Amino acid sequence: MSKKTNLKAALRNRTGSGRLNQMRKEGWLPSVMYGMGKANQNLKVDARAFHDVLAHSSSENILINLDIEGVGTSLAFLQAVQHHGITGAAIHADFRAIDENTEITAHVPLHLEGEPLGVKNGGGLLEHTVHSLEIRCMPNDLPDTLSADVTHLQVGDSLHIGDLKLPQGVKATHAAEVVVAHLAKPRVVEEVVVEAAPAPKGKKK
C-alpha cells in the first residue's frame, strides 16, 4: 500500500503567469489545494523536494501530509501534475484535501508477471494493452502498483479486468470485459522468391 509522504508548503498570494514564473525561478512549485468543502488554497511547495517525492514513487498518485506553514497539516491526494511541454519538469500541482474516509480515484501502474505458455510453446506475442488501471479505494488501501499473472495464457487468449485479483478494498472503474493483455498469434513472414531474369540472347552474326 502507498505510504504517506510529508511535504512542506506555504500560502502564496502571487498569481498571473509572470509572477508564477518568477516563483518557479526562486525554486518554488505553484500549487493549489481544494476539497473537503473548503475554499481553494493557493500554495507553493519546494520544487526540489516535490521532484524527490515523484522520483521515489511508482506513479503520480501519492498521499501526502501537506504541512502548510502557519496553517497546519492536511492529508491530501496529489490529483494532477502539470509538466513543461519541452523539459518535462513539473510546473504546477493540484492537491485534493481528503480524510481517511474519503474514497479516491487513482491510476495505478499495472505490470504483467510471468512468461505465457503460448509464448514458450507456440511462439505467441504478448500484447500489453492497459499499462495503468483506474481504480477507486480508500486512502489506506491505495496500492503502489498492481500485477497480473499471465503464465497461463495460450495463443488467442486474453486477460480481462474481471480476471484481475485486486487487493481488498480496491475496485476497477472500467468494465470487467476490458482487455488488459492478449496473446496474439505469431507473425508469419512470407518469403518472396525473386527469379532471376533470363540473360539476353546474343545476336547472331
Image (cartoon, rainbow, N blue to C red):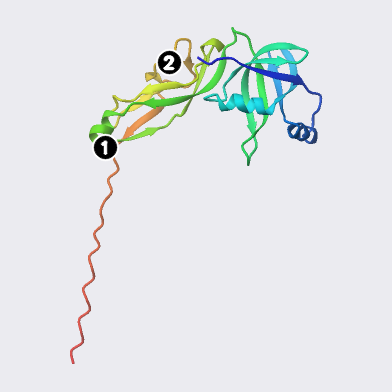
Mark carried by residue 53: none
Precedes in sequence: disc 1 or disc 2: 1
Compared across the picture, whether 151 is left or right of 44 comes to left
Tell me where residue 5 appears, x and y as whole percent. 60, 17
Q: Is residue 205 visible?
A: yes
Three-letter amino acid code at the position of disc 1: Gly
Three-letter amino acid code at the position of disc 2: Leu
Tell me where residue 144 appears, x and y as whole percent. 50, 19
Compared across the picture, whether 186 is left or right of 140 comes to left
Q: Quadrant of residue 92?
A: top right
Mark 1 Cα-neighbour bin, 10 Å: few <14, some 14–19, many ≥20:
some
Tell me where residue 79 appears, x and y as whole percent. 62, 22
- Asked whether the residues under the numbered discs 1 and 2 touch, taking CB atoms below 8 Å apart as contact, a structural biologist would say no
Q: Which residue is mark 1?
A: 123
Name the foreground residue: 141 vs 158.
141
Mark carried by residue 166: 2
- Disc 1 is placed on an element classified as loop
Name the foreground residue: 148 vs 114.
114
Q: Quadrant of residue 33?
A: top right
Compared across the picture, whether 156 is left or right of 127 comes to left
Residue at (81%, 27%) from the top-left corner? Answer: 14
Mark 2 Cα-neighbour bin, 10 Å: few <14, some 14–19, many ≥20:
some
Task: Please tell me whether residue 201 is drawn above or below residue 128 in the rendered image.
Answer: below
Q: Farthest residue toward the right?
A: 13
Residue at (28%, 24%) from the top-left corner? Answer: 152
Mark 1 and mark 2: Cα distance apart in space: 29 Å
Compared across the picture, whether 203 is left or right of 75 comes to left
Q: Quadrant of residue 100?
A: top right
